[in-house]
Amino acid sequence: MATRNTAKTTASSESVKQITYLAAALKAPRITEAAARLADQARDAGWTHEDYLAAVLEREVSARNASGARLRIRAAGFPGVKTLEDFDFDAQPAARQQLAALASGGFLVEARNVVLLGPPGTGKTHLATALGVAAARHGHRVLFATATDWVTRLTDAHRGGRLPQELTRLRRYGLIIVDEVGYLPIEQDAANLFFQLVSSRYEHASLILTSNLPFSGWGGVFGDQAVAAAMIDRIVHHADVLTLKGASYRLRGRGIDSLPSIRTTTGQTES
Ligand code: ADP
Ligand code: MG
């Protein structure tokens, strides 16, 4: 009895060595740990060989997916990681259902866009980030930047004669997020570059845009009504447009009811 047990232990320790070697060759080192841990469980519970193999491979695949998502979230350049679970939908009850549907990621497969409109502090950046995080978890590559940053990147690429290559490269990202359209005006040349970004993604890959201005105010931002109209046309052709409402979440409980309206210059006094 003792002899048989020893023989079995020796055999399995040789198998373990071989598994370690083979898992390293497959660049799947987590298989070694899962194989050993699950082997005991499999023996105790009387799993079939197929059950055991599936369980081991499942551990490797889910670990890979999780670390892939972590890398994609880090590479996206979010200003901070926010999720839909962190979002208090009591502040935006009308958006709850639509966001839950968007979080499943179907819009990315169809290359649809999402536009989040609303006053400052209503959660536009939070929700754009949360949808970006969900996209990264679904396996999509994501890039986040403000409209001003995108304009800088596109201008640099254009000056270096690399705009077509840059637009092609960006199309490999399933999702591009353009935050804060409307906070700063965009010059006409830059507006044309931005238009090319929108056109190059049209019906190929998704965009999420956020803005404190309604579409009617975009002509003023892009300095040209025709460019703005052509751009909005492409953006909203296949898009979910969500308008967030209410007071700034940042100011909750601070005794400040409202922020100056868009036209008021910050810092101006009545006198
Ligand atoms: P916006 O981009 O519309 O100006 P943000 O998304 O930056 O607003 O929101 C401002 C701050 O308030 C952020 O820290 C964000 O996480 C938080 N916030 C806004 N709305 C909500 C909400 N409904 N639930 C939880 N946090 C929120
Ligand atoms: Mg914001």
Image (cartoon, rainbow, N blue to C red):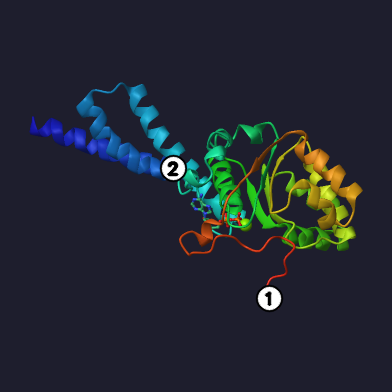
Q: Residues within 10 Å of mark 2 (few under 14, many from 20)?
A: some
Query: Which is more foreground, mark 2 or mark 1?
Result: 1
Residue 22 found in image quarter: top left
- Residue 63's tag is 2
Q: Earlier in the sequence, mark 2 or mark 1?
A: 2
- Number of marks in the image? 2
Residue extending furthest bottom?
A: 271
Viewer-closest of 248 and 116 = 248
Looking at the image, which residue is at 49% across and 59% down?
A: 252
Ligand 2, image quadrant it occupies: bottom right
Distance from the alpha carbon under mark 2 to that under mark 1: 57 Å
Q: Locate residue 17, reporting x and y percent.
A: 33, 43
- Amino acid of disc 1: Thr
Residue 9: quarter of image: top left
Front-lying residue, 200 or 190: 190
Q: In the visual, does 82 lie left or right of 45?
A: right
Percent of width and height locating residue 237? 78, 34
Q: Is residue 153 visible?
A: yes
Residue type beneath disc 2: Ala
> Residue under circle 1?
269
